[in-house]
Amino acid sequence: MSRPSRNQDQLLIETAKRLYPEVGASGMSLKRIADEAGVNLGMFSYYFGSKSNFIRKVLEALAEESRVDNAIPLPASAPSIERLRCFLLTMSHSYRDHRRLALAMYRDFLNQDPDVTEHLLDRVLLQTTELTPLIEECQRDGYVDDTLAVQQIIGFCMGTVKTPIVVAASQEREPDQGPQLLQEGVTRMLTDESIAQRVELALRAIAKPGPARR
Protein backbone atom coordinates (compact mmCIF):
# COMPACT_ATOMS: atom_id res chain seq x y z
CA MET A 1 0.00 0.00 0.00
CA SER A 2 1.50 3.35 -1.03
CA ARG A 3 1.93 6.10 1.55
CA PRO A 4 -0.06 9.34 1.16
CA SER A 5 1.67 12.28 -0.48
CA ARG A 6 3.66 14.27 2.05
CA ASN A 7 2.08 17.58 1.08
CA GLN A 8 -1.53 16.54 1.61
CA ASP A 9 -1.49 17.66 5.23
CA GLN A 10 -0.30 21.12 4.16
CA LEU A 11 -2.91 21.20 1.41
CA LEU A 12 -5.64 20.56 3.97
CA ILE A 13 -4.25 23.26 6.27
CA GLU A 14 -3.99 25.82 3.45
CA THR A 15 -7.56 25.10 2.38
CA ALA A 16 -8.81 25.54 5.94
CA LYS A 17 -6.91 28.83 6.26
CA ARG A 18 -8.67 30.10 3.15
CA LEU A 19 -12.10 29.03 4.42
CA TYR A 20 -11.68 30.19 8.02
CA PRO A 21 -12.77 33.83 7.49
CA GLU A 22 -15.96 32.54 5.89
CA VAL A 23 -17.01 29.82 8.33
CA GLY A 24 -14.82 30.04 11.44
CA ALA A 25 -13.73 27.02 13.44
CA SER A 26 -17.29 26.25 14.58
CA GLY A 27 -18.53 26.00 10.99
CA MET A 28 -15.50 24.19 9.64
CA SER A 29 -16.63 21.09 7.70
CA LEU A 30 -13.89 18.53 7.27
CA LYS A 31 -15.71 17.10 4.27
CA ARG A 32 -15.83 20.49 2.55
CA ILE A 33 -12.15 21.07 3.24
CA ALA A 34 -11.26 17.62 1.89
CA ASP A 35 -13.42 18.14 -1.21
CA GLU A 36 -11.95 21.57 -1.98
CA ALA A 37 -8.42 20.35 -1.32
CA GLY A 38 -8.95 17.26 -3.46
CA VAL A 39 -7.83 15.03 -0.60
CA ASN A 40 -9.50 11.87 0.73
CA LEU A 41 -11.51 12.59 3.89
CA GLY A 42 -9.75 9.74 5.68
CA MET A 43 -6.47 11.69 5.57
CA PHE A 44 -7.63 13.88 8.46
CA SER A 45 -7.34 10.94 10.84
CA TYR A 46 -4.06 9.85 9.26
CA TYR A 47 -2.40 13.24 9.67
CA PHE A 48 -4.18 14.94 12.57
CA GLY A 49 -6.08 12.34 14.58
CA SER A 50 -8.98 14.65 15.47
CA LYS A 51 -10.70 17.81 14.26
CA SER A 52 -9.50 19.65 17.37
CA ASN A 53 -5.89 18.85 16.60
CA PHE A 54 -6.42 19.90 12.98
CA ILE A 55 -7.89 23.26 14.05
CA ARG A 56 -4.90 23.81 16.31
CA LYS A 57 -2.55 23.25 13.37
CA VAL A 58 -4.54 25.71 11.27
CA LEU A 59 -4.39 28.32 14.04
CA GLU A 60 -0.64 27.79 14.39
CA ALA A 61 -0.19 28.36 10.66
CA LEU A 62 -2.28 31.54 10.81
CA ALA A 63 -0.26 32.77 13.80
CA GLU A 64 2.99 32.25 11.91
CA GLU A 65 1.69 34.33 9.03
CA SER A 66 0.69 37.04 11.48
CA ARG A 67 4.15 36.98 13.07
CA VAL A 68 5.74 37.67 9.69
CA ASP A 69 3.22 40.41 8.86
CA ASN A 70 3.82 42.14 12.19
CA ALA A 71 7.61 42.31 11.97
CA ILE A 72 8.52 45.84 13.09
CA PRO A 73 10.52 47.59 10.33
CA LEU A 74 12.48 49.87 12.70
CA PRO A 75 15.97 49.36 14.16
CA ALA A 76 16.39 48.98 17.90
CA SER A 77 18.30 52.28 17.89
CA ALA A 78 15.17 54.24 16.92
CA PRO A 79 13.55 56.30 19.71
CA SER A 80 11.32 54.19 21.90
CA ILE A 81 8.20 56.21 21.08
CA GLU A 82 8.80 55.70 17.35
CA ARG A 83 9.11 51.95 17.87
CA LEU A 84 5.86 51.95 19.84
CA ARG A 85 4.13 54.00 17.13
CA CYS A 86 5.46 51.63 14.46
CA PHE A 87 4.33 48.59 16.47
CA LEU A 88 0.78 49.91 16.73
CA LEU A 89 0.64 50.96 13.07
CA THR A 90 2.02 47.66 11.79
CA MET A 91 -0.33 45.63 13.97
CA SER A 92 -3.31 47.78 12.93
CA HIS A 93 -2.58 47.44 9.21
CA SER A 94 -2.23 43.66 9.51
CA TYR A 95 -5.43 43.49 11.57
CA ARG A 96 -7.25 45.60 8.96
CA ASP A 97 -5.98 43.46 6.09
CA HIS A 98 -7.11 40.27 7.87
CA ARG A 99 -10.25 41.68 9.49
CA ARG A 100 -12.60 38.94 8.27
CA LEU A 101 -10.34 36.36 9.86
CA ALA A 102 -10.19 38.37 13.10
CA LEU A 103 -13.99 38.69 13.13
CA ALA A 104 -14.41 34.93 12.60
CA MET A 105 -12.04 34.24 15.50
CA TYR A 106 -13.92 36.60 17.79
CA ARG A 107 -17.16 34.84 16.94
CA ASP A 108 -15.56 31.51 17.82
CA PHE A 109 -14.27 33.05 21.05
CA LEU A 110 -17.74 34.30 21.99
CA ASN A 111 -19.09 30.83 21.19
CA GLN A 112 -16.50 29.49 23.68
CA ASP A 113 -14.65 27.32 21.21
CA PRO A 114 -11.86 25.91 23.44
CA ASP A 115 -9.14 25.75 20.77
CA VAL A 116 -9.73 29.29 19.49
CA THR A 117 -10.03 30.64 23.04
CA GLU A 118 -6.68 29.12 23.97
CA HIS A 119 -5.14 30.48 20.77
CA LEU A 120 -6.39 34.03 21.33
CA LEU A 121 -5.26 34.04 24.96
CA ASP A 122 -1.81 32.90 23.84
CA ARG A 123 -1.76 35.74 21.30
CA VAL A 124 -2.71 38.27 23.98
CA LEU A 125 0.08 36.94 26.21
CA LEU A 126 2.58 37.19 23.35
CA GLN A 127 1.61 40.77 22.53
CA THR A 128 1.78 41.69 26.21
CA THR A 129 5.25 40.17 26.45
CA GLU A 130 6.39 42.15 23.40
CA LEU A 131 4.80 45.45 24.43
CA THR A 132 5.65 45.51 28.14
CA PRO A 133 9.40 46.26 27.84
CA LEU A 134 8.77 48.76 25.03
CA ILE A 135 6.21 50.70 27.06
CA GLU A 136 8.45 50.61 30.12
CA GLU A 137 11.25 52.04 27.98
CA CYS A 138 8.91 54.80 26.74
CA GLN A 139 8.08 55.59 30.37
CA ARG A 140 11.77 55.77 31.33
CA ASP A 141 12.45 58.02 28.33
CA GLY A 142 9.68 60.41 29.37
CA TYR A 143 7.32 59.77 26.46
CA VAL A 144 4.63 57.82 28.33
CA ASP A 145 3.00 58.61 31.67
CA ASP A 146 4.87 56.53 34.24
CA THR A 147 2.00 56.77 36.73
CA LEU A 148 -0.11 54.51 34.51
CA ALA A 149 0.09 50.72 34.90
CA VAL A 150 1.63 49.02 31.88
CA GLN A 151 -1.24 46.53 31.65
CA GLN A 152 -3.70 49.43 31.60
CA ILE A 153 -1.76 51.09 28.76
CA ILE A 154 -1.65 47.87 26.73
CA GLY A 155 -5.37 47.23 27.15
CA PHE A 156 -6.21 50.81 26.19
CA CYS A 157 -3.97 50.86 23.11
CA MET A 158 -5.20 47.48 21.86
CA GLY A 159 -8.80 48.51 22.31
CA THR A 160 -8.27 51.87 20.62
CA VAL A 161 -6.68 50.50 17.47
CA LYS A 162 -8.42 47.13 17.13
CA THR A 163 -12.02 47.70 18.15
CA PRO A 164 -12.97 50.08 15.29
CA ILE A 165 -11.60 47.56 12.79
CA VAL A 166 -13.68 44.71 14.24
CA VAL A 167 -16.77 46.95 14.26
CA ALA A 168 -16.14 47.94 10.63
CA ALA A 169 -15.63 44.30 9.62
CA SER A 170 -18.94 43.35 11.23
CA GLN A 171 -20.75 46.06 9.26
CA GLU A 172 -19.23 45.51 5.84
CA ARG A 173 -21.75 44.72 3.13
CA GLU A 174 -21.84 44.25 -0.58
CA PRO A 175 -21.81 47.61 -2.43
CA ASP A 176 -25.56 47.44 -3.13
CA GLN A 177 -26.52 46.47 0.42
CA GLY A 178 -26.96 48.55 3.55
CA PRO A 179 -27.33 52.31 4.04
CA GLN A 180 -24.83 54.27 1.95
CA LEU A 181 -23.88 56.54 4.86
CA LEU A 182 -23.02 53.51 7.02
CA GLN A 183 -20.92 51.96 4.28
CA GLU A 184 -19.03 55.21 3.72
CA GLY A 185 -18.30 55.38 7.45
CA VAL A 186 -17.03 51.79 7.46
CA THR A 187 -14.76 52.52 4.49
CA ARG A 188 -13.28 55.57 6.22
CA MET A 189 -12.59 53.63 9.41
CA LEU A 190 -10.37 51.23 7.47
CA THR A 191 -8.17 53.73 5.65
CA ASP A 192 -4.48 54.18 6.45
CA GLU A 193 -5.23 57.78 7.43
CA SER A 194 -7.89 56.78 9.98
CA ILE A 195 -5.64 54.09 11.43
CA ALA A 196 -2.79 56.58 11.80
CA GLN A 197 -5.14 59.04 13.51
CA ARG A 198 -6.30 56.42 16.02
CA VAL A 199 -2.71 55.48 16.81
CA GLU A 200 -1.86 59.15 17.42
CA LEU A 201 -4.92 59.53 19.65
CA ALA A 202 -3.81 56.51 21.68
CA LEU A 203 -0.28 57.89 22.06
CA ARG A 204 -1.60 61.28 23.13
CA ALA A 205 -3.82 59.67 25.73
CA ILE A 206 -0.92 57.81 27.38
CA ALA A 207 1.65 60.61 26.98
CA LYS A 208 3.50 61.92 30.01
CA PRO A 209 1.92 65.20 31.14
CA GLY A 210 3.93 68.29 30.31
CA PRO A 211 5.64 69.60 27.17
CA ALA A 212 5.20 67.20 24.24
CA ARG A 213 8.31 65.28 23.23
CA ARG A 214 9.18 64.19 19.69
Image: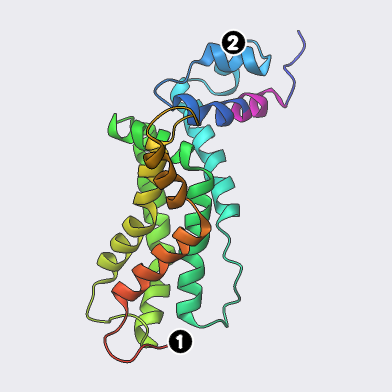
Is 13 located above or below residue 59 in the figure? above
Q: Name the residue under label 1.
A: 214
Residue 37 within the magenta-colored segment of the rendering: no
Q: Who is closer to the viewer here, 190 or 67? A: 190
Give the amino acid type for the residue marked by disc 1 in the picture: Arg
The residue under the point 60% across, 15% down is 34
Give the amino acid type for the residue marked by disc 2 in the picture: Gly
Q: Position of residue 10 (x, y in %)?
A: 66, 29
Q: Position of residue 48 (x, y in %)?
A: 54, 23
- The circle on residue 5 is none
The mark closer to the camera, 2 or 1, is 1
The residue under the point 50% across, 74% down is 83
Quadrant that contains the C terminus: bottom left
Q: Position of residue 126 (x, y in %)?
A: 42, 56
Q: In this view, does 57 lie to the left or right of 109?
A: right
Look at the numbered disc 1 and give the secondary structure of its residue. loop
Look at the numbered disc 2 and give the secondary structure of its residue. loop
- Main secondary structure type of the part rendered in magenta: helix
Is 34 located above or below residue 146 in the figure? above
Location of residue 120 by image quarter: top left
The residue under the point 43% across, 74% down is 134
Segment tinted magenta in the rendering: 7-14
Q: Residue lying at the far front in this picture: please name it.
A: 180
Q: Residue lying at the far top in this picture: please name it.
A: 1
Q: Name the residue under label 2.
A: 42
